[in-house]
Amino acid sequence: MPIFMPSAIRNHHADACLEIDWDDGLNSRYAHEDLRVQCPCAGCRGHTPDQAKVITGKADVHISAIEMVGNYAIRISFDDDHDTGIYTFEQLRSDQNKS
């Protein structure tokens, strides 16, 4: 499976979505709420499936910052002070293909 890289990443606070243009021309949009409740960090997902938490009540949460992590991911900070999720490009692209 090819690895796709973002050519542009835009946070739309008013629309509560993150938009990514991929290097193959695909444009993806991700709701802030969905990204927050699906946070891949160990604190949210646990180290084993039975440790995973169900995250709810995040409809009004917004992205406050986005930071590149090497050439493979972004770290998203949310305005509820949660900032430990590393979202790989592979996972973001995979999630886009499911919708």
Image (tube, grey):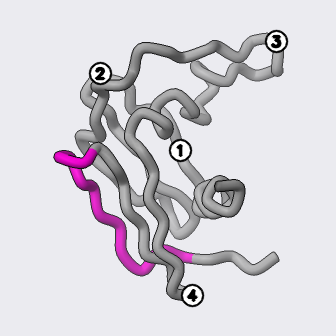
Magenta stretch in the rendered image: 5-15
Ranked by sequence position, the earlier of labels 1 and 2 is 2
Ranked by sequence position, the earlier of labels 1 and 4 is 4
Residue 4 located left or right of residue 6: right
Q: Nearer the viewer, residue 33 or 84?
A: 33
Q: Residues within 10 Å of mark 1 (few under 14, many from 20)?
A: some
Q: Which residue is mark 2?
A: 80
Please tell me whether the stretch drawn in magenta is mainly helix, strand or loop.
strand
Query: Would you say residue 8 sits in the magenta stretch?
Result: yes
Say which of marks 3 and 1 sits in front. 3
Q: Are marks 1 and 2 in contact (CB under 8 Å)?
A: no
Q: Residues within 10 Å of mark 2 (few under 14, many from 20)?
A: few
- Amino acid type at image mark 1: Ile
Q: Which residue is mark 3?
A: 50
- Measure the C-alpha gap from mark 2 to mark 3: 25 Å
Q: Secondary structure at mark 2?
A: loop
Question: What's the residue at 53%, 79% (across, down)?
Answer: 26
Q: Does residue 46 lie above or below 14 as drawn?
A: above
Q: Which mark is residue 24?
A: 4
| Quarter location, residue 64 | top left
Quick one: which residue is furthest to the bottom in this view? Answer: 24
Ranked by sequence position, the earlier of labels 3 and 4 is 4
- Measure the C-alpha gap from mark 3 to mark 4: 37 Å
- Amino acid type at image mark 2: Asp
Query: Would you say residue 60 sits in the magenta stretch?
Result: no
